[in-house]
Image (cartoon, rainbow, N blue to C red):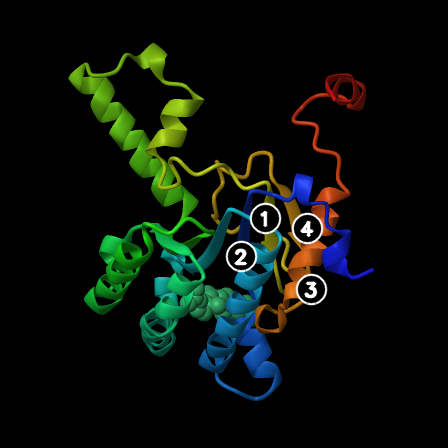
Amino acid sequence: MSLLDKINRDTTPKHIAVIMDGNGRWAQKQGEERLFGHNFGVEAVRETLKAAQEIGVEYLTLYAFSTENWNRPKEEVDGLMDLLVRTISGEVDELHKSNVIISSIGDTDGLPDSCRNELQAAFDRTKKNTGINLILALNYSAKWELIRATKNIARLVKSGDMKLDQVDEATISNMLSTHGIPDPELLIRTSGERRVSNFLLWQIAYAELHFTEVLWPDFKQEDLYKAVLDYQSRERRFGLVSAQLEKNT
Ligand code: FPP
């Protein structure tokens, strides 16, 4: 039985988020520059998207560039931005054909014009599609969006448009860049690091975390299936005890 056949389609996560880590180490292991690894990382994005489509995932969020990544050497930052523009313009036809809806989360105003324009064209082109949502986290960090949400709520309270007592979970969720998107049930991080690195901190409150030693450029469809099978082997209790869950099913 293949890994794919073992997946229970009834409990496939609706939303999978991925911290794509290990491109630099993958390149350095073969005596290449870090950008070489990022370039090969694009193939892993294709593999992951294909696997997610195959098993009926509705949202796939990829951490492509964090607000902290600007501090990397200029050559790497420029190379990553260039790669992003080339990848989006080169892949958009294929993505559109396979019914993918492309969107982003993060502070895209801070991205170079070339990148913003390419992204906007891809969003416009694919917005009427009905397949998987491919969400690119670009110039994103959870702390950035939580600060922005807090300021927006404070403004509404100050102006009298919202009462302090009305602020609840939904208020905050709706102020985040993921508003309207269900929280990820599964977060995957590659490369053996076991951190969440400022990614979707609010949204992963109840997510299952899957860490794999595989470096991102080596990540294949089978690796996504392994992560989903790991997720399906867990008991998600949401703060309850097992007996309560059994009673509710
Ligand atoms: C982390 O590996 C990876 C990144 C910061 C960039 C991710 C970008 C891609 C996979 C390429 C393009 C993606 C899209 C969606 C077009 P790292 O550099 O931190 O690796 P290291 O920890 O081994 O140094």
Distance between the alpha carbons at the discs numbered 1 and 2: 8 Å
SS for callout 4: helix
SS for callout 3: helix
Is label 2's Cβ within 8 Å of ligand 1? yes
Question: Would residue 67 appear left or right of 210 to someone viewing this image?
Answer: left
Question: Would residue 231 appear left or right of 37 to someone viewing this image?
Answer: right
The answer to whether residue 192 shows anywhere in this view is no
Residue matched to label 1: 187
Q: Residue at x 67, y 51 (%)?
A: 210
Residue matched to label 3: 222
Circle 1: is it few (<14), some (14-19), or many (20+) Cα within 10 Å? many
- Choose mark 4 or mark 1, whichever is in front: 4
Q: Earlier in the sequence, mark 3 or mark 4?
A: 3
Is label 1's Cβ within 8 Å of ligand 1? no
The image quadrant where one finds the N terminus is bottom right
Residue matched to label 2: 19
